[in-house]
Amino acid sequence: MIRAIVHQGSVGKGIEYFAAVAGPDVDRRFFFEQIAAPRGDVIRYFAGGSEIVLNPEGVRFHGNGGLFGEYMFGGHLPVGDLLNDEVVNRLVLFGATVDAKTHELKFTYNNAGFETYDSIFLQGNAVANYVFFLDDRKRYEDTTDRQAQTLRAAGKLLKRSKRVGSGQFIALAHEVLAALDEPDTTLFLLRIINRANQRFSELCHDAYANKRSLDELSATYADDDLGRVEAYQRERIQIGVIYHDPNNQELIDEYKRILASCAGSTISPSARARLMRIRTLSLRNEVPLSIFDTLEEILLQEPRVANEASEEPDYIQSTREILGGFLLGKSITRRLSSLDMVQLMENKQKAGANRDQTFEELLLDTGRQIDEIGLQEEDFERLESFGELVTLFDRIDHTTMLVNKLAFMDDVELTQEQVRSLVGNMQVFEKLRRGLFQQLFIDPVLANEYALSYGKKKLYSLTLGLLSIENNEASITEVAGSIASINRIERAYFAVYKMVRRRMANFYLELNTLEGRETFRREIKAEIGLDENLRELQDVINESLLEEVITKIRLEAFYINQLLPRIVDDQDIRVRTDFLSNSGLDLFQIEELESEYFEMRAFPPELLRAIQRPVGHPEPSEGSMAVPGSSHR
């Protein structure tokens, strides 16, 4: 038994069609005629008072039925259809209108008309669209009743069927008849194709599948057939091809879902961050950002952003964006690129330097949401990728702690195990970007005005040692030993320094003459020889170390007795800044001397704070940098 008859042909310039007539007794019915006309052949399908006429310019229709086709991005979609993930097709029934006040769909008897092919492929799908009508053998005498029943029985199918986009029109015809459940009804279904647009679409699909790019297609526009593809249609087709890539489709649909959750309200900072993350991921696949702009325009009417987002610093906004990627749809990869990792590391250091806890709060909140999602669905990639990020942050914290201890605390050295961990961490950071270890952990500390002079020496030794280990020029034991050696010299220096300070009782006149300094040096040596606590450091207490101590004390005396009174009187903080830059004294030592000076003279504390926090030298951070205080030494 013949269940369907299929016609294939062409009409006009570049229009191809397939007609499927499905239903009972189709082999014994007359429903088709081809009419020769001066402007070109006319194809007519008719039955039961309805008809579809294909002529060279467009489609004439009368009776029941309608048009449908797969939605394309690049044009405006009804909000209701856009927010429904199952709706993939556009459906227009002849004679249907929407009441402006009640928004209810009504059917009228105005069911005859004409649509040019340009209009059909512009308003509908750029490649293929469908026109249909039913011959129900007078089951419904009234056309409006017929249209209403068609919508009730087959409307959902026509809006959601994937067969529409794939071109499976015969299977689609039988699905519609099954949905109607009317044994005597015949379906007339015509698939109309724009051949130039179809060929361009195929070229786009092949190019994107092979190279993930459509940039090279412009060279093909000179072809006669493709030259008829309008610029706007080319753009729609390209967007459609990009959208239908599985990875891209999930990104775009996720963007749509986030926007839908914000419809009617402001876009929160977390939602905006996730939207920006999707845009970033989409750029890697050359997804046009116009897709997302169109979605925002449709769903929000105008982009609305919560005020809090614009007030956040850049490092927090970019952190929200990257971490928001972990909360996107399950089909979107959560593997962070090396650029993402580096950006988060830099953001973490900036947040620490600014004592901004928002970064850690965002990390904790993201982890909490991932745990909640994990209870509902098994998403091992999300958990694994976030776990890798947390491990990286642990490495950052551990490295920062060790580096800061060396730089900002006295009498600190590294064990071989700590050096080994720094070697491993440096290798991880350097894989992300060459020079990253130095940039994130060494340079900011060396630039910090509170870093100790001996702390800087240890950092230089550590940096050179780690590079030597990497080049197989030194061992972990040797690097730990070099830092331990500097640490012994540091202990000896401050032991002698304290001894000298006690002996001098803040009077430095002895040191102003060469003879006085030689006498002082002999007396200190004798006292050192009698001090049991310094016996183990005798080998590093040499003339060079003694000269360093004496020089530092003379500089302190010069600052307290000559420069500081001038700074206080003239309120000239530039003199202080210049002295700190050239003297080599540790800042915390100068601040202690200044505090003693102001306390002895009962100067107001505000004056001390004014000279200790000059312009360009902000208050030191307590976040990522340890700040030495009066408890040291």
Image (cartoon, rainbow, N blue to C red):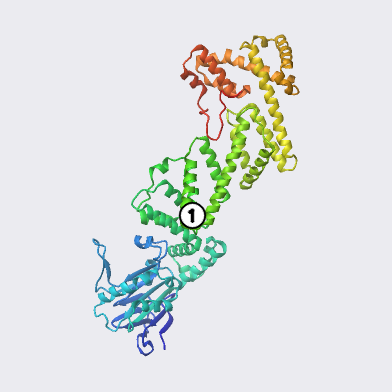
Image point (36%, 79%), residue name = 177
In which quadrant of the rendered view does residue 462 lie? top right
Is any part of residue 263 visible from this angle?
Answer: yes
Q: Position of residue 398 (x, y in %)?
A: 60, 39
Position of the N terminus by quadrant: bottom left
Q: Position of residue 276 (x, y in %)?
A: 46, 50
Q: Return the residue nearer the eye: 587 or 231.
A: 587
Q: Position of residue 260 (x, y in %)?
A: 38, 55
- In the rendered image, the residue lying farthest to the front is 532
Identify residue type, mark 1.
Gly
Location of mark 1 (residue): 374
In which quadrant of the rendered view does residue 187 lie? bottom left
Above or below, 603 relative to 463: above
Crowding near pointer 1: few (<14 within 10 Å), some, many (20+)? some
Q: Return the residue nearer the eye: 419 or 624.
A: 419
Relative side of 92 to 522, left or right = left
Is any part of residue 41 visible from this angle?
Answer: no
Q: Position of residue 451 (x, y in %)?
A: 60, 29
The residue tagged with tag 1: helix, strand or loop? helix
